[in-house]
Image (tube, helix red, strand yellow):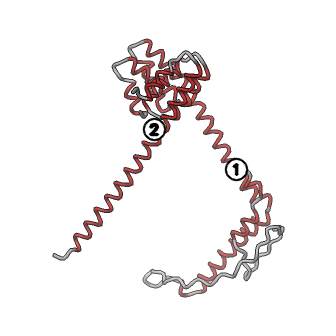
Amino acid sequence: MDLKVLQARLRDPDQWVRVEALRILAMVDEVRALRDIEWVFKNDPEPGVRQVAQWAGQIVYAAYKQQQQQRAAGAEVDRQREERLLNSLVDTSPATYQAMQAQLLQRELSDALRAESNPKTKPTESGEFPALPEAAALSAPPARDTQQDMKQVTIQADDRPDMLDLLDAGLSDEFFED
Amino acid sequence: MPDVLEVWIKRLRDPDIEVRREAVRQLEAIGDPAALGPLATIFALDPDLEVRKLAQWAGKSIYHAIERRAAKAQEINAASLEERRTAAEILKKAQSRKPR
C-alpha cells in the first residue's frame, strides 16, 4: 500500500474507503498527499468525509511545517560548519594559508617559465601540441612532526613540502569536532 | 486456525489498554500493510493518547518499510534491465563475428 494506492483510494466510491485512506495519510504524515487531502476537503460529496479530510489536513500540514523547519536548521548547520573550516584555514594558521598561496603562485610561475623556454612545448605548425615530456621525480616530502608549530614555513625552490601536509597542519581540532 | 494478523487486529478493539498496546506492537513486528487501516483507526479514535502515539509509530514503520522495499525492487529492475541490454549487445557482437 503505497502513496499511489492511497491517492487512488481518496476517489473511491465507498466513503469508508476514502475515510480510511485519509486516516492512513494522517497517521504516516504523508506531506506529498497534502494537495489530494485539500481536494477531498473541498470537493467530497460527504460532509463526514470532508470533516475527516480537514482533520487529516491539519495533521499533515503540521508535519510539513516541521519538515521545512528541520531543513532550514540543517542548511544552517552546514553553512556554519563550512565557515568554521574556512576560519580554521585562515585565522588559526594564517602562515599555512599564506604558504599554500605562495606555493601555488610559485608553481604557476615555474610552469609558465618552463613553457616559454622549452621549444618542445610550443605548438607545431600544424597547431597540435607535441607529447608531454616525462614528469620529473618529485623530491621526498619532509618528515612530518604533528606537534611542530607551523607558524613559520619557508618555501624554497628545491624543497617543496607536500600540499596535503600543509593543509593537514593548518586544520584545527575544532573542525573535527561534531 | 485463525490468521495471526486477524487475531491481533481484533485485539486492537480490546477494552484492556495493555492488550491494545501489545496488539499494536505485534502488528508492527508482523509488518503487513493490511494492518495500516486498523492502525489508522486506532490512531484516530483510541481514547488513550499513548496508544494513539504507539499506533502512529507502528503505522509509520510499516509504511516506510513498504516504500523502501518498493524502491529496492525498482533499483533491482533497473539493474537487471541494464544487464539484459549488455548481454544482448554482447550476443549481437558474437553473432556478427561468427564465420559464415
- Callout 1 crowding tier (Cα within 10 Å): few <14, some 14–19, many ≥20: some
Q: In the drawing, does residue A88 fall left or right of residue A137?
A: right
Q: Is residue A60 visible?
A: no
Residue indicated by mark 2:
B66
- Asked whether the residues under marks 2 and 1 belong to the same chain, the reply is no
Which one is closest to the eye, mark 2 or mark 1? 2
The picture places residue A147, in percent across and down from the top left corner, at 82, 67
Chain bearing tag 1 is A
Instruction: Give percent across and percent down for residue A9.
Output: 38, 26
- The type of residue carrying mark 2 is Ile
Q: Nearer the viewer, residue A100 or B94?
A: B94
Residue A80, image x and y in percent? 70, 47
Q: Dot 2: within a 10 Å radius of its alpha carbon, few (fewer than 14), some, or many (20 or more) residues? A: some
Quarter of the image with the N terminus of chain B in it:
top left
Image side of residue A135 versus residue A126, left or right: right
Helix, strand or loop at label 1? It is: helix
Is residue B89 depicted above or below B76 in this figure? below
The residue carrying mark 1 is A81
Residue B20's place in the image compared with A86, above or below, is above
Q: Amino acid at mark 1?
A: Arg
Q: Number of numbered discs present? A: 2
